[in-house]
Amino acid sequence: MNDQFKKMLEDEDYRLIAAKILARTGDKAGIEPLREFYPEADELEKQRILRALMSLNAPELAPFYCTQCGAEMVTVRRLAQNCLVKLGKPAVPVILAMMESAQLVQKRMLIEALGRIGEVECILSLLDLLSDDDWRIRFSAVFGLERCADKLEAKHFMTLRAALVAEDNETVRQAIERLLDREYDA
């Protein structure tokens, strides 16, 4: 059956639908055609393409998803973040590498993805971000830590208490205090 859809990739009239079907059925032959259509697609079509690609659970798409976390449309950013979260641990090194050059909105989406993934490496990276110069990044780091609060250990809460003492932004302070309130809930 997939061979018929692969043949349809050659026909411009059916290329997009065939690529989506291939991706949704787990065939990576749909990746490149979907990526070709993506830049010119409208918001709704971008969402459809991302959902089809998410079906593949392909770690090689992590850089693409990271880039889309900086998209103009919030629905696309959220869906790209969901794709990264679905990839889980294999996406973490890519997320960390791409955070270095990410714009603010993209970086905040990637930080939240780390929290939702919740691996030890993610937690340590989020804790490191508590000393960032930008209060919005620190706030996003706390927000990410809230997403994986059930995985935080005593040593992580010690780091949070130290960050609270050093924090000068009231919004971030309140977020840290809320997270610290959860220390004994587990």
Image (tube, rainbow, N blue to C red):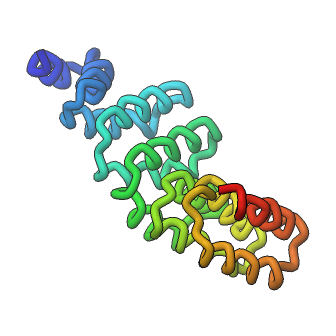
Residue 149 drawn above or below residue 1: below
Q: Residue 136 location, x and y as percent? A: 75, 65
The residue shown at (34%, 49%) is 61
Q: Residue 87 location, x and y as percent? A: 38, 48
Q: In terms of depth relative to the viewer, which is nearer, 73 or 127?
A: 127
Is residue 101 among the parts visible in the rendering? no
Residue 169 drawn above or below residue 53: below
Q: Is residue 159 left or right of residue 64?
A: right
Q: Is residue 90 left or right of residue 44?
A: left
The residue shown at (23%, 31%) is 26
Q: Residue 75 location, x and y as percent? A: 61, 35
Residue 130, quarter of the rendered image: bottom right
The residue shown at (31%, 51%) is 59
Q: In terms of depth relative to the viewer, which is nearer, 58 or 148?
A: 148
Image quadrant holding the N terminus, namely: top left
Q: Residue 107 location, x and y as percent? A: 59, 62
The residue shown at (65%, 56%) is 186
